[in-house]
């Protein structure tokens, strides 16, 4: 396996400069999607189905159109056949374009509460809403199918007569009228289980949860006189928004420009288009720009949450602690259309352990809920919760320290992953040892009903295509432009990588995000890939700049470029050390040596890297009420080389708190008609500042050989361990094993009561 | 049939400047701040009073501007994030938020800054618990609140220090 060459100490990478975008954000000047205005723009609003499953019998828009101030109404009938059948969409793999189009606006059938049926453009949002209320629709209501078990049951209502199974990284086959399936196997579990000395087995459920970004989905679209569509919106990937809109509207991709605006949170949920095709069609009809914004109610009812699941897991070990067999069956909600996260979900279920005999069976189950979208480490939480809970249980039965058992069975670099590939370089054992030696691990718990839990997670980060362009100005400053949206500071972490190579100060580098017509195709900001992949693009372009500049120095000194050396920000002549230029000096002479300089790089790292994290949590359970308090929390994660350690820490803390919300509070609650009953941020209960303590962080830096600086993706994995860590802590505190999420007070209390009765 | 000419004239003070605007009685203060006065620093996160992104001060009281009608702002003094920095000098809270990386996407930041300002005006030296309780009405989905709480503590120290000088 390749090793990093020894390199001089970093000058910029590893420091924690102020974020470039922070000043605009604390003064309210940063331009988010809703802060964009065009003169005379109209406002669009949508009519959404109140039914989870129904046939649209008729739509009458006459009354809406006659309302003064309403300019246009569109329905599914206004949309063309999509131009292609399948499109690659980020971590979601290839998606069915007709499904994507139907998810934006229903044609003949609605598949979930909140499914768009029509949209109105009017002078202002209030009139548009009034217009929506004047659209008359007749439905034939069908029975909704609201959970994976009933959707998989014999005789369940069939949601789609025919469907293309989702392909979330791995191929899925249609296996049931409402479900696709994926099976991964290695070894022989039947013989292995018969050889086991101890077997643990349980069923688990998790609920549908939302990414919960504070900025809703908002877009402004102008379909101009030349037939060019301009879109100003925030998303995780403006190129992918362009591609989706192009195929849905059957318009050439070069006829669409998407300009990215500041994004107010994504977490995987802003990879899909929802409103853009509707606003485009309304703009085409009215000849005016149209802004559309989803209310919070609409965002919760109709944009991609993460799957609720049902799973059954069995793990077997020898008495010496070797885990030799695991059998996992996990049914993930796909939502109204196929393509939930079963691939990465089941692949990462056990991948941090070396288990020779495995069967991982995933189901992608269509239900009458919004189409599932990626949410930070898609699928990972749902499969980690059962496995990490059972590993804890196994340790107890074996009389072993749960951490030692994990170390004993830990997957290491080069071990075979279930797909047959060798595991990329990482150091799980080092991470686990770090946790074990941390003061938190040994600190005494002070009171009764307090407990400590730990969980360990492994999740890949992806490569994919990125484009970067660097321009050197005459004053020695440099512009970096990339195609990656900045979710949480990547403009800074990318500029830092450029500064490291170019040997100049960070203050002399600005970093921007290019629109789709200004920079090369770049894959979306997902899969923890931006600092890694786009970083490689920036580094590659920066190296081109240095090589070009060396050539210019050679020209000035009348020598060969191989005679030019670049060291610590200075170009010098090898055979005449008196001749030297700083970066700035040479930049001022570009004009006279052939013109100013820019360099681009398109890279597409195919490597998948490994992110690992382990979280340690102390809880106290009030046995009278079941209320749980988190007393102490420490998150450990391997970041590879941490480009900006403070931003890495922010990723770990934010992910941990999202995981805590998933564990304790968050769930979609549907009524018997299949309508979302908690579509507000009061009732969809995300963690507040009062619910969590400080999240301590420990960053490990095992270099990633596929990045020049050893960088790993860091954004996702820390959402995975909190759920199981808290479940294990609850057991440690009060002796009950929670197997369903969220672990709210009522559930904890019921388990405590059951325990007392026995 | 809806009539467009039913607008009301409102006089108020926004960030120490006198303003007059016309609004419909159904428009929220948030809508008028953003769309009419073009003060887009105040954000809409939920439009139903649950997330705190639209927090502003009205006569010194912290409110969700999405839950107040603009017509109610008659004669009121309103403070928004745009008024935090005075004469180009950042407020200590803004400095602390930058220094502590107390923001990621930045969407909840203006509301949290205004909410924190209201806290420090009432309680110049808050404990961690005071801060967490006060900010419980401002949702942040990116940071896990850790750096936000630290930033407010640091700003409080700086403000105390500058008062002593």
Image: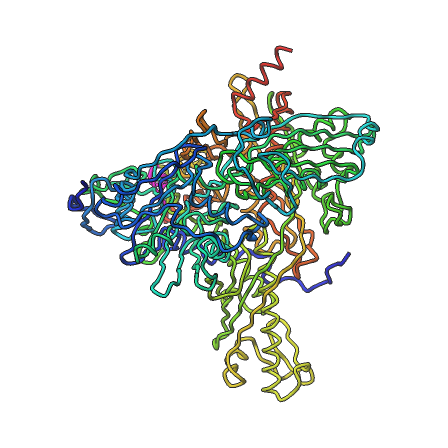
x, y percent for residue A429: 74, 43
A408 vs A616, left or right, is right
What range is drawn magenta here? B114-122
A98 vs A441, left or right, is left
Q: Give the main secondary structure, helix, strand or loop, of the magenta stretch.
A: helix
Query: Of A457 and B5, which appears nearest the observer?
Result: B5
Residue B119 drawn in magenta:
yes
Q: Give the colouring mode of the picture.
A: rainbow
Residue A484 drawn in magenta:
no
From this viewpoint, is residue B116 visible? no
x, y percent for residue A49: 39, 36
**Location of residue B75 (image quadrant):** top left
Compared to A634, does A313 lie above or below? above
From this viewpoint, is residue A605 visible? yes
Tally the marks: 0
Query: Of B127 and A747, which appears nearest the observer?
Result: A747
Compared to A575, does A25 lie above or below? above
* Residue lying furthest bottom: A558
A435 vs B7, left or right, is right
x, y percent for residue A76: 40, 46
x, y percent for residue A632: 57, 33
Query: Of A385 and A176, which appears nearest the observer?
Result: A176
Compared to B71, does A631 lie above or below? above
**Location of residue A158 (image quadrant):** top right
- Quadrant the N terminus of chain B occupies: top left
Compared to A368, does A549 lie above or below? below
**Location of residue A738 (image quadrant):** top right
């Amino acid at each position: 396996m390749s090793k990093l060459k020894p390199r001089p100490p970093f000058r910029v990478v590893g420091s924690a400069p102020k974020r470039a975008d922070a000043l605009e954000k604390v003064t309210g000047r940063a331009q988010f999607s809703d802060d964009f205005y065009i003169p005379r723009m109209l406002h669009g609003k949508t009519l959404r189905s109140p039914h989870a499953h129904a046939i649209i019998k008729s739509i009458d828009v006459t009354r809406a159109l006659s309302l003064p101030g309403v300019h246009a109404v569109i329905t599914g009938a206004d949309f063309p056949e999509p131009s292609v059948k399948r499109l690659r969409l980020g971590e979601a793999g290839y998606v069915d374009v007709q499904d994507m189009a139907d998810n934006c606006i229903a044609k003949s059938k609605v598949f979930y509460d909140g499914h768009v049926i029509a949209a109105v453009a009017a002078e202002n949002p209030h009139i548009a809403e009034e217009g929506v209320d004047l659209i008359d629709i007749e439905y034939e209501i069908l029975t909704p199918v609201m959970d994976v078990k009933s959707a998989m049951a014999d005789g369940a209502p069939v949601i789609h007569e025919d469907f293309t199974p989702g392909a979330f990284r791995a191929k899925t086959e249609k296996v049931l009228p409402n479900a696709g399936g994926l099976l991964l196997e290695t070894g022989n579990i039947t013989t292995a289980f018969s050889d086991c000395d101890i077997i643990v087995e349980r069923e688990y459920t998790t609920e549908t949860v939302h990414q919960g970004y504070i900025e809703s989905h908002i877009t402004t679209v102008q379909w101009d006189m030349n037939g060019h569509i301009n879109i100003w919106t925030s998303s995780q990937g403006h190129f992918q928004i362009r591609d989706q809109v192009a195929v849905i509207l059957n318009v050439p991709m070069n006829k669409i420009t998407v300009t990215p605006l500041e994004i107010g949170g994504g977490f995987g949920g802003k990879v899909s288009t929802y409103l853009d095709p509707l606003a485009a069609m309304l703009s085409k009809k009215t000849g005016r720009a149209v802004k559309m914004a989803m209310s919070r109610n609409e965002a919760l009812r109709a944009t991609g949450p993460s799957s609720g699941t049902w799973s059954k897991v069995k793990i077997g070990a020898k008495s010496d602690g070797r885990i030799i067999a695991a059998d996992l069956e996990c049914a993930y909600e796909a939502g109204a259309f196929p393509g939930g996260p079963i691939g990465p979900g089941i692949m990462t279920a056990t991948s941090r352990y070396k288990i020779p005999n495995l069967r991982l069976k995933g189901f992608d189950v269509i239900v009458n809920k919004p189409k599932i979208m990626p949410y930070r480490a898609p699928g990972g939480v749902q499969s980690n919760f059962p496995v990490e809970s059972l590993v804890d249980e196994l340790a107890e039965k074996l009389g072993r320290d749960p951490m030692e058992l994990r170390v004993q069975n830990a997957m290491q670099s080069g071990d075979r992953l279930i797909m047959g590939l060798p595991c990329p370089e990482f150091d799980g054992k080092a991470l686990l040892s770090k946790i074990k030696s941390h003061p938190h691990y040994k600190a005494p718990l002070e009171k009764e009903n307090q407990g400590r839990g730990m969980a360990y997670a492994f999740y890949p980060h992806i490569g994919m295509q990125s484009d970067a362009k660097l321009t050197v100005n005459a004053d020695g400053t440099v512009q970096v432009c990339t195609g990656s949206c900045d979710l949480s500071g990547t403009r800074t972490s990318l500029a830092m990588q450029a500064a490291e190579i170019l040997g100049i100060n960070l203050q002399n580098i600005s970093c921007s995000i290019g629109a789709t017509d200004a920079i090369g195709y770049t894959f979306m900001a997902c899969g923890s890939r931006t600092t890694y992949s786009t970083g490689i693009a920036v580094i590659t372009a920066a190296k081109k700049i240095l090589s070009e500049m060396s050539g210019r120095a050679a020209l000035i000194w009348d020598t060969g470029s191989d005679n030019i050396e670049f060291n610590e920000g200075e170009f010098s002549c090898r055979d005449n050390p008196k001749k030297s230029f700083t970066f700035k000096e040479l930049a001022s002479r570009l004009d006279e040596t052939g013109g100013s300089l820019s360099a681009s790089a398109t890279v597409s790292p195919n490597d998948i890297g490994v992110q690992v994290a382990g979280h340690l949590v102390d809880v106290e359970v009030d046995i009278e009420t079941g209320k749980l308090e988190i007393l102490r929390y420490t998150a450990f994660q391997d970041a590879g080389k941490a480009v900006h350690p403070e931003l890495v820490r922010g990723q770990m803390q934010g992910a941990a708190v999202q995981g805590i919300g998933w564990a304790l509070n968050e769930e979609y609650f549907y009524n018997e008609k299949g309508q979302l009953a908690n579509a507000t941020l009061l009732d969809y209960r995300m963690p507040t500042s009062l619910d969590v303590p400080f999240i301590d962080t420990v960053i490990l830096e095992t270099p990633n050989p596929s990045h020049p600086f050893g960088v790993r993706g860091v954004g996702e994995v820390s959402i995975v361990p909190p759920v199981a860590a808290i479940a294990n802590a609850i057991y440690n505190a009060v002796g009950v094993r929670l197997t369903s999420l969220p672990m709210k007070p009522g559930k904890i209390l019921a388990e405590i009561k059951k325990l007392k009765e026995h | 049939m809806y009539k467009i000419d039913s607008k009301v004239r409102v006089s108020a003070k926004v960030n120490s400047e006198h303003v007059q605007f016309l609004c419909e009685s159904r428009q929220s203060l948030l809508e008028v701040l953003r769309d009419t006065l073009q003060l887009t620093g105040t954000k809409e996160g939920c439009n139903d009073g649950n997330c705190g992104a639209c927090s502003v001060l009205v006569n010194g009281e912290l409110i969700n501007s999405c839950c107040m009608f603009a017509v109610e702002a008659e004669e009121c003094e309103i403070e928004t994030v745009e008024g935090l920095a005075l004469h180009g000098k950042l407020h200590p809270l803004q400095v602390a938020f930058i220094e502590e990386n107390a923001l990621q996407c930045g969407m909840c930041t203006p509301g949290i800054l205004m909410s924190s300002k209201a806290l420090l005006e009432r309680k110049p030296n808050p404990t961690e618990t005071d801060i967490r309780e006060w900010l419980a009405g401002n949702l942040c989905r990116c940071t896990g609140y850790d750096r936000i709480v630290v930033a407010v503590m640091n700003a409080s120290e700086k403000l105390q220090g500058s008062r002593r000088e």
